[in-house]
Amino acid sequence: MIEKLSANRIQLFNEPGCDRNQAKKPDERSKGCSKPLVPGATAGGCALDGAKVTLQPITDAIHLVHGPLACEGNGWDSRHAASSGPTLYRHGATTDLSEMDVVLGNGEKKLYRAIKEVVAKYSPAAVFVYATCVTALIGDDVDGVCHHAAEKLGVPIVPVHAPGFAGSKNFGSKLAGLALLKHVIGTVEPDDVGPTDINILGEYNLSGELWQVRPLLESVGIRIRACITGDSRYRQIAGAHRARVNMIACSTALLNLARAMKERWDIPYVEGSFYGIGDTSAALRSIARLLVERGAPFETLERVEALVTEREASAWARLAPYRNRLEGKRVLLYTGGVKSWSIVSALQEIGMEVIGTSVRKSTVEDKARIVDLLGADARMFESLPPREMYASLKRGDADIMLSGSRTQFVAFKAKVPWLDVNQERHVAYAGYDGIVELARQIDRELHCRVWREVRRQAPWDLRDVSQGAIVSQPASEED
């Protein structure tokens, strides 16, 4: 198990699709772009977490964690990946290994019994089995159990080797892509292949964001054969090798999968983002151009241009009232990954000034995009301690903070508006409709009366020392 993981690690770090990776010396390339985590040190997400959030949006499958209960409990449903149909993916399943199981070597038997139970109870399209730190270290033959169960039960059982100690959350996503490539993609031959079929890689349908993008593509005759993995079905991903084009929508987390599909099935890929007006239009145009190069009708490109012209005009018109109220407002962005630059681009279109952005879990390419957007003096930080974050907000450096829920209380303590833009959010911000919704949410938070009220000094703090009287401060008409 450990040897196999080491081989996979070297293979994924030697990524031919990454120009920056190939520019390194061989010994530096094998070390990868991030340091492995120590077992148990899951702050910021471990490899298991990355694999789970990547594969769990496959909605008609059961996702079974082979390890202690906490490994499943800590990562279950950490993203609001919405489904238009099956809800099996929301069932938490684990073998719940204890110390006694480890000592007696019951892991493999317990795994097989768990697979049999979930197949009998739920009849899933497939079962994804996730190895954890414990089962990797004690050497459970997860591959052997999965292969035996698949033969006996007649259901695809997919092993996912992404124990937490393997590396970061981003690396876990790469291991998830490797599992799909080895065991899923190419196992089903679709009978409805079309010239404008595409796959979207790295889109997880957070709060329904895929549903803001799919209608745009369908309106110009482009069909999403498989979204890997937002609101997807197992058979859709199994037949994804017959798409004409791949689009990577989440930075380079699944670059290894896109590159491998190009080598194996000759499917070219393009990177893009659906956050903001300009990036959405650029992504649509890139997809259309690549499809036309692959033999799709030229009218596809013409339809996309017509759509972009119409939807951009509509989006800018709907944004105008918000831009008048948000122009020049300062934002502290504390998120990570692809959002560290894609949200920056969207905020600039709204007319806001980004005073700084975190680059946690961001790739070198993500950071380069931030510099392109904010200039060479862009303030980027891997982490911002709560004390420093509070001091910055208290000084008035930013008018609002956009981040994940873990830092919301720092903003509240500093009496600064806050908006959730991380994976736990319940509002979708993709496409032309999404940027308008983002502006609406920011405007609502910034101009909420509660902030003026909590910043007002209490009457007992306005005591006139000379007279010993309390001086009240009446609210203004604006308040």
Image: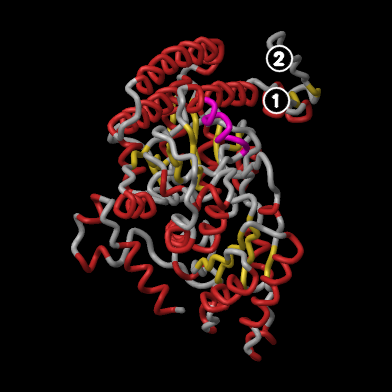
- Identity of the amino acid at label 2? Asp
Residue 210 is covered by the magenta coloring: yes
**Residue most toward the bottom?**
104
Residue under numbered circle 1: 456
Front residue of 99/403: it is 99
**Which secondary structure is most common in the magenta stretch?**
helix
Instruction: Tell me, for residue 280, which label it has, or none.
Output: none
Q: Secondary structure at mark 2?
A: loop
Q: Position of residue 465 (x, y in %)?
A: 73, 27
Q: Position of residue 116 (x, y in %)?
A: 70, 72
Question: Where does the magenta region start and end?
Answer: 207-215
- Give the class, few, some or many, for how many residues have Cα within 10 Å of label 1's Cα (few <14, many ≥20): few
The earlier-in-sequence mark between 2 and 1 is 1
For the point 36% across and 17% down, the residue is 302
For the point 61% across and 36% down, the residue is 208
Q: Position of residue 73 (x, y in %)?
A: 68, 62
Q: Secondary structure at mark 1?
A: loop
Residue 313 is covered by the magenta coloring: no
Q: CA distance from mark 2 to mark 1?
A: 11 Å
- Identity of the amino acid at label 1? Arg
Vertical placement of 182 versus 413: above or below?
below
Q: Is residue 218 left or right of residue 413?
A: left
Residue under numbered circle 2: 479
Front residue of 100/214: it is 214
Q: Position of residue 163 (x, y in %)?
A: 51, 69
